[in-house]
Amino acid sequence: MSPHLFPGPGAAATLLLIVAAVAPVPAAASAAAANSPEKAAAVVRVAMPDGFVGSAKCRGCHEDDWQRWSSSHHAKAMLEPSDSSVIGDFHDVRFDSARGPSLFHRGAADSGDWLVEARGPHGERHDYPVRYVFGIDPLQQLLLELPGGRLQAYPVAWDARPKERGGQRWFDLAPGDASKPGDALDWTGYMRNWNLQCASCHSTALRKNLDVATKTYATTFAEINVACEACHGPGAKHVEWAASAKPPFGGAASEGLAVVLPRWSRDAWQFAAPTVAIASRTSPPTEAQTTTCAPCHSRRSLLKEDAPADASLYESARPQWISEPSYYGDGQQHDEVYVWGSFLLSKMSQRGVVCADCHDSHSLALRADGNALCTRCHRSEVFDVESHHHHDAASTGARCVECHMPETTYMGVDARRDHLIQVPRPDLDAEARVPDACTRCHAGKTAAWAVDAMDRFYGPQWRRRPSAPTTLASAAKRGAVGAAQLLALAEDKSQPSLLRASAVAAAENGAMPASVTALGRLLRDDDAGVRLASLDLLGGVAPAQAPTLASPLLDDPVRTVRITAAALLADAPDAAMTAAARASRDRELAEYVASQQLNADQPFADVNLGNLRARQHRQADSRAAFEAAIAIDPADAAAYVNLADVDRAFGDEAGCRDVLARGLKALPDSAALRHARGLALVRDGRAAEALADLEAAARLDAGAARYAYVYGVALHSLGRSADAVSVLERAESAHPYDVEILQALVEMLATSGHDDEALGFATKLAQALPGDPDVARMIAALQAAER
């Protein structure tokens, strides 16, 4: 069954989001209530969890830090509306978009309301008071209220940039989008819901408090914005320590702090000698100096709300792996992935650079302006000179960031710099289809032009630099041969840990049972991400060996690894596990279910629960979970496909067909649904009718090798062997070293007397399955036939 962990490509590109989520109007709410424009009490309640004290307590002893923080984007991440916080023009301004008009205006003179007249969730137009403003620069969004405790991010935002830069205007975050009520991306839909999309990273100690049954919220936060305890953890013991004449909480080293973050010092980096061009760290950084930032500066699926601020990201979340299309083939960010992933791949990160080395932790400002930021650690006489950058010193091209951290604009106006921080690689443009810094600035020039220029500047050696992310992206497209390369890359501990974990994940499409030996080693890796990705792969490659290989991870020190192992082993026979392992599985399965229920306002969580219940042979519970996902998002193809598969698995082919018909009514161009219906028709003995669906699936999703393979086999079974070979040859070209496609081609060509062509594909099959005796015998037979 299809896992469903993250939103589709670009799903978060129009909001300050982390992962997709949902909150439909409760079933009990009437249309009138759902559109009620009446002002309600505070939407979100302040609730201090145990140990939290609030930032006001910090100010007395940390005035300078507090002042720097109070003007930062963290302090202004979310605010109640006021004359000082609302920066948009509400003087009866009308803005038209594909979704219809919006009118921004003020309420009665004594009400103080900032109002948006907009079309509501049932089509009627109403005034919606602005409950909160969201962000401050370069744009500000508005949060409007809907029933059930929901706050929704309105898709028309205020451009806060100066007028001379095109700002001081309302603009559409998704121009051309004509979403309607009921659509996920409508302002009333789950993709724009604050409680699940944005809240955990814009407020402190947020608790979503979702009622799973009604899909309503009683969300709370300790502070409305990103305050002191968001990074430093609960402060009560530190306040006690400060008030005590004798520190009782771990001595001066911890000072009662829940999270110890070393105060930044310029002396952390020193040049080893006058002739050394790049500084080195004088002592290794602490893990907390990067893990504290990770949860909100990564694309991830949150699975736990109250993890310590300095805990491993894997303790509270599943990050998105480095893969296309979220990342480019060289590791640069493509979608809105919040820079953490690219930064972990960088040489800077590998050599000990942490966020606070470049950014003031409280004001968030850069620690120096322009190239001065970089020349603190890269000698200016070596790097900030024309002989290095080959641009006029006064030009944009002489700025370090233009070559090493090119910008991508998100949300229409928000330019963010890539944190891969790499040497420009225009030579990879054609191979990996990635943008390069040179042609981003030199519009109209080609990558070949940039390669020639860099050859003149630096000689050809710059092209010899290895690019492990490019290796990952290339190998991911080479089937079984690529999978072997990916697992070898994953075992290379000189590579960044996130890259290694991503390599394991990318091996999914080509890994074979023979891969289990490497997986056995990777499941014991020191890195939690590598272990997590290896568990995901193990279920598809060697499920029979899962009880032996995965059971030790039920007691892993990292929570997300433990619960993933439990979900993998949910249907393992009791006899295949020790009593202790069964007890651990039951304990961690409860945690896994809780992590999905935390996200029960998102379709992916219900799909995951549906898959779990199906594997536990709980048909009714499985069906209910998939139906819950469909209720959240009627356009979620995975929910329909998996629901239909449950009906099929329990012998209800009629029910399977009904579900697929329902799904295709909502999503007529879904490749997954067309493929599933084609298979259902084949099982019903209607292979000729199935062909149209199988062809459509292969055409609609050319990236799915399996769809092309099944379509080719279907053509062959109907006597259209020449057409089948043609389809499969094109598929093999697009998906080299795909074992199923190669096996089908060898068999079809050999049986039709084309031994020479069959031998060519059999030779490739031998590369995909080295040492396989059946392939060796096949090649020998084809060679004998040729003679």
Image: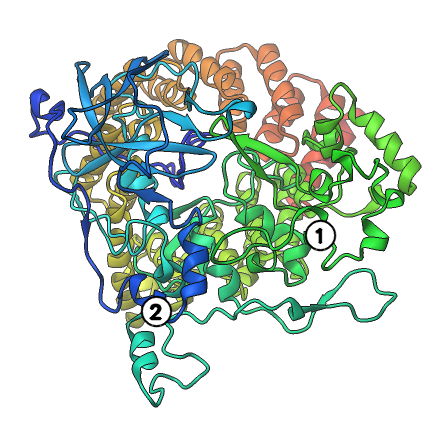
Q: Residue at x 6, y 30 (%)?
A: 28
406 or 321, which is in the foreground?
A: 406
Position of the N terminus, as image quadrant, is top left
The residue tagged with tag 1: helix, strand or loop? helix
Tell me the kind of residue under disc 2. Gly
766 sits to left or right of 743: right
Q: Quadrant of residue 733?
A: top right
29 or 356, which is in the foreground?
A: 356
**Is residue 782 shown above or below 135?**
above
Specify the label residue 372 is tagged with: 1
| Residue 315 place in picture, x, y as percent | 39, 60
Labels in figure, total: 2
- Pointer 1 local density, CA inside 10 Å: few below 14, some 14–19, many at least 20: some
211 sits to left or right of 192: left
Specify the label residue 60 is tagged with: 2
Q: Residue at x 65, y 69 (%)?
A: 268
| Residue 728 place in picture, x, y as percent | 60, 20
- Pointer 2 local density, CA inside 10 Å: few below 14, some 14–19, many at least 20: few
Tell me the kind of residue under disc 1. Ala
The residue tagged with tag 2: helix, strand or loop? loop
| Separation of residues labelled 1 and 2 (CA atoms) | 33 Å
Q: Residue at x 41, y 38 (%)?
A: 136
**Is residue 138 shown above or below 348?**
above
Query: Would residue 401 be visible to someone looking at this image?
Result: yes
Q: Residue at x 27, y 27 (%)?
A: 189
716 sits to left or right of 617: right
